[in-house]
């Protein structure tokens, strides 16, 4: 009986010693995992914020088709030439202004077709109401709408050549790191696009199609 008690006591002691040896290793492993996870989340955080920048519309559906109201009036098209409602969220920290453009990369020009260019939108404005693309509407008085490929400022709707198939119409909003682009209403769209890209923090896109 005494021998059995001694064996039990010895086994219990060995178990306690082994546990004491294992515990520091377990704690060290847990600490290492915690450090790695913290490093990963720190590196991924900026990308996660950028991915949340989104553009949407109550007028158009991303991936859908351009409505008649947003088509151009002229050049053989009989639309209403009304710019769509647009709204965005999730702009990155440091955004000081926004710019909005509409571009058709499929226009047979070699460089696409600029349908709408708006810049110097204040950082606290996160939407454009329907019809804001008419400079005479006064719906975005703080911003500048510059010359499109139609030759005048403001929104110019979709009007692809007949028989040319569907064109993509890409609406983009850009978060910029400057309060203003030092450009005016007469600045060509390509020059505005150059300045936008030189100062952008992030961009979001909504695309629709139309053909005739």
Image (cartoon, grey):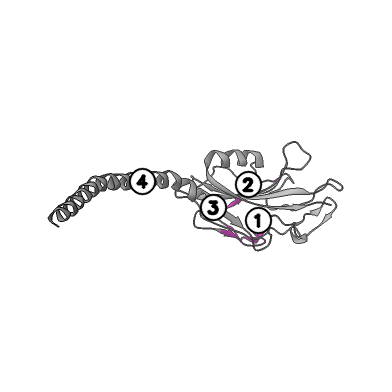
Q: Earlier in the sequence, mark 3 or mark 2?
A: 3
Q: CA distance from mark 3 to mark 4?
A: 31 Å
Viewport quadrant of the N terminus: bottom left
Q: Position of residue 201 (x, y in %)?
A: 51, 44
Q: Secondary structure at mark 2?
A: loop
Q: Earlier in the sequence, mark 4 or mark 1?
A: 4
Q: Residue furthest top?
A: 110
Q: CA distance from mark 2 to mark 1?
A: 10 Å
Instruction: Kindly indicate whether the residue at mark 1 contacts the one at mark 2 (C-beta within 8 angstroms).
Output: yes
Q: Secondary structure at mark 4?
A: helix
Q: CA distance from mark 2 to mark 4?
A: 56 Å
Q: Earlier in the sequence, mark 2 or mark 4?
A: 4
- In this image, 148 relative to 1: left or right? right
Mark 2, other Cα within 10 Å: few <14 / some 14–19 / many ≥20: some
Q: Which mark is residue 53?
A: 3
The residue labelled by disc 1 is 135
Residue 69 image-quadrant placement: bottom right
- Mark 2 vs mark 4: give the one in front: 4
Q: Earlier in the sequence, mark 3 or mark 1?
A: 3
Q: Which residues are magenta?
A: 127-148
Up the image or down, 2 lies above or below 111; here it is below
Q: CA distance from mark 3 to mark 2?
A: 27 Å
Residue at 65 percent of width and 39 percent of height: 190
Mark 3, other Cα within 10 Å: few <14 / some 14–19 / many ≥20: some
Instruction: Kindly indicate whether the residue at mark 1 contacts the one at mark 4 (C-beta within 8 angstroms).
Output: no
Q: Which mark is residue 33?
A: 4
């Amino acid at each position: 009986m005494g021998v059995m008690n001694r064996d039990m006591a010895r086994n219990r002691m060995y178990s306690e010693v082994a546990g004491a040896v294992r515990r520091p290793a377990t704690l060290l492993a847990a600490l290492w995992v915690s450090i790695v996870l913290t490093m990963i989340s720190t590196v991924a955080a900026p990308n996660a914020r950028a991915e949340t920048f989104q553009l949407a519309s109550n007028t158009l559906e991303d991936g859908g088709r351009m409505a008649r109201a947003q088509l151009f009036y002229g050049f053989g098209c009989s639309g209403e030439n009304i710019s769509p409602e647009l709204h965005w969220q999730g702009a990155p920290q440091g955004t000081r202004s926004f710019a909005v453009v509409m571009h058709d990369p499929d226009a047979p020009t070699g460089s696409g077709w600029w349908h709408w260019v708006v810049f110097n939108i204040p950082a606290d404005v996160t939407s454009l109401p329907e019809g804001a693309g008419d400079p005479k509407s006064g719906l975005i008085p703080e911003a500048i709408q510059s010359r499109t490929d139609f030759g005048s400022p403001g929104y110019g709707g979709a009007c692809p050549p007949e028989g040319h198939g569907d064109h993509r119409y890409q609406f983009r909003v850009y978060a910029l790191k400057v309060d203003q682009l030092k450009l005016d209403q007469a600045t060509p769209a390509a020059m505005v696009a150059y300045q936008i890209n030189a100062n952008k923090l992030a961009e979001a896109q909504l695309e629709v199609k139309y053909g005739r």
